C-alpha cells in the first residue's frame, strides 16, 4: 500500500494507487490554522478507508504543530467531530 504524501506548497495530502489519486486539500486562512476544503476519493479507490487515512494524516500534522482546524468538507468534518482528540483542535 502506498504512503500518504504531503505537499505543503500545494496544500494537499495525496495517496496514489495504480495511477489514481485520492487527495485532501486545505487552506491556511490565518497563521496557526488549517481549513480542510475537500477530501476526494475516486470510485476505483473508494470504500477502503483511504479518505479516513487522508484526514488522519492531516489531523496528525495539525495536532503535532499545535494548530487549530476547521472544515467545509462534510467527510472531514464528520470524522473530526467523532474523534475527541481532534474535535478539541477545532476553531
Image (cartoon, rainbow, N blue to C red):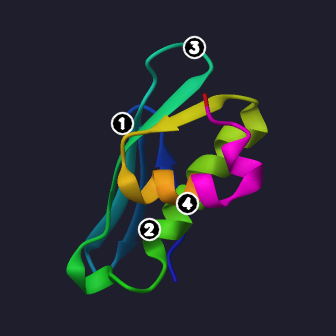
Magenta stretch: includes residue 85:
yes
* Disc 4 secondary structure class: helix
- Say few, some or many: other residues with alpha carbon within 10 Å of mark 1 (under 14 / 14 to 19 / 20 or more): few
Q: Please, is residue 43 above or below residue 89 in the view?
A: below
Residue 41 picture location, percent across and down: 31, 69
Which label's residue is closer to the chain start, 4 or 2? 2
Disc nearest the viewer among 4 and 2 = 4
| Residue drawn 22% across the image and 80% down it | 43
Dot label at residue 19: none
The residue beneath circle 3 is 31
* Disc 1 secondary structure class: loop
Disc nearest the viewer among 4 and 3 = 4
The residue beneath circle 4 is 79
Task: Report the magenta residues as a range.
Answer: 81-90
- Say few, some or many: other residues with alpha carbon within 10 Å of mark 3 (under 14 / 14 to 19 / 20 or more): few
Marks 1 & 4, CB-CB < 8 Å contact: no
Amino acid at each position: 500500500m502506498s504512503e500518504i504524501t504531503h505537499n505543503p506548497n500545494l496544500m494537499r495530502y495525496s495517496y496514489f494507487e495504480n495511477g489514481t489519486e485520492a487527495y485532501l486539500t486545505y487552506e491556511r486562512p490565518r497563521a496557526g490554522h488549517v481549513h480542510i476544503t475537500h477530501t476526494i476519493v475516486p470510485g476505483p479507490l473508494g470504500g477502503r478507508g483511504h479518505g479516513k487515512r487522508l484526514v488522519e494524516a492531516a489531523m496528525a500534522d495539525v495536532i503535532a504543530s499545535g494548530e487549530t482546524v476547521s472544515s467545509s468538507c462534510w467527510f472531514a468534518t464528520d470524522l473530526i467531530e467523532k474523534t475527541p482528540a481532534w474535535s478539541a483542535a477545532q476553531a
